[in-house]
Image: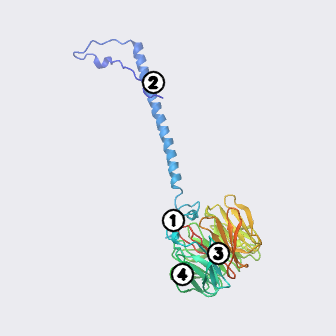
Amino acid sequence: MNSRIAFRRTPSARSTAGAPGSAPRSRVPARARLLAGGLVAASALLAACGTQGQSDGTAKEAAVLEKQQEKKKGPKPIYGLPGMPPVENPKDIYAANRAGNLAPFMKKVKERIYVPNTKSDTVSVIDPKSFKVVDTIPVGNHPQHVVPSWDMKTLWVNNNRGNTLSPIDPLTAERKADDVEVHDPYNLYFTPNGKHAVVMASLDREIVFRDPQTMKRQHTEPVSCYGVNHADFSLDGRYFIVSCEFSAELLKVDTEKMKVVDQMKLPFEGAMPQDVKISPDGKTFYIADMKAHGMWVLDGEKFTTPKLLPTGKGCHGLYISRDSKEMYIPNRGEGSISVFDFAKNKLTKKWWLPDGGSPDMGGVSANGNVLWLSGRYDDEVYAIDTHSGVQLARIPVGAGPHGLAVYPQPGRYSLGHTGIFR
């Protein structure tokens, strides 16, 4: 609409009458005066309509711009455990793990697969491009896992029976120092703020909080369950869930207080919980169980009785895809890998290793294209295409390969195990 109607207004009689030296007052017919008044009213009405239209349009445009701005900014970051890097995307805590998102230090790291051989007391080093072992590093007695430090600059080999940690420099793919004495280090984690290393002392029945650099003991938390081994942290880092392999139990631990705050027995006779992993949205914990042949689905906040989702015989490890859409689940007892779709909340695929195998622990390549898994009872490592499930290679290594680490990895910091990055 046009908000203005142009017309010539007739001079008012009141404004000129009786003025000294003014021209004689003209007489304007009543009909003309009525017409002029009507035009003035129409003009005002149209102006008002135009202003209202502009106001509504501006408001709508502002609302659209505001939504676009919110979309650009994304959800507000979560500041959880004191000192922890903020969760930049609460809808996907693995957002920093996208392919190509390597920290400056990681860009200098050699691409290698580190395989701890529990019965050979060595670490086999594989070149992922040639699918060949390029080095063998002697370590302590019975190495279980190769664990990236919180700052990602050291790979700690957990020598479970040797009561030591062997440090490897990922820049050179060689030993970087002498072993560090740490009792019963079955597995190793780091609190999200980098303040503590957390040793899962399985046979000692302890969760031991240590200095992340020197590994000096800071706090020992005795546990009543048997076989503490795997864990993962909540979205805000304030607690973590721990599996107890030999007593079929789960623990909930307060990170800051370093205290067990809850405990439960799994509702399955002979259950044997293994790896633990949280969903991308931080709402659900999954716990692999090699005797229940599936994974437990747990609400970590409520810590109520979990439900069992069958996957396959000997369900053991849990690994997130680079796009956070799927989780790869090796079933060690049947030589298969189940694929869980987070959006669909169900298993969608199952890949079988040709000639069988015993897929155990491992990780996903930095570009997300290859799933690397140790063959625990077959003294080999499997490389599996994550798009097709096709086996790319079977690589002979030492005896009893277990928690292998893929390096480098995208992310901001490491929570430990074979590589949980956020």
Q: CA distance from mark 3 to mark 1?
A: 39 Å
Query: If you read the primary sequence from the N terminus, does the residue marked by circle 2 or circle 4 appear first?
Result: 2
* Camera-side mark, 2 or 4: 4
Q: Nearer the viewer, residue 124 or 35?
A: 124
* Camera-side mark, 3 or 1: 3
Question: According to the image, label 3 marks what residue?
Answer: 132
Q: Nearer the viewer, residue 330 or 354?
A: 354
Tag 3–tag 2 contact (CB < 8 Å): no
Q: Nearer the viewer, residue 105 or 412?
A: 105
Query: If you read the primary sequence from the N terminus, does the residue marked by circle 2 or circle 1 appear first?
Result: 2
Question: According to the image, label 2 marks what residue?
Answer: 42
Vertical relation: 240 (above or below) 8: below
Query: If you read the primary sequence from the N terminus, does the residue marked by circle 3 or circle 1 appear first?
Result: 1
The kind of residue on which mark 4 rests is Arg
Residue 210 in view here: yes
Residue 17 falls in image quadrant: top left
Q: Quadrant of the C terminus?
A: bottom right
Q: CA distance from mark 2 to mark 4?
A: 82 Å
Question: According to the image, label 1 marks what residue?
Answer: 86
Q: Secondary structure at mark 1?
A: loop
Question: According to the image, label 4 marks what residue?
Answer: 210
| Mark linked to residue 404 | none
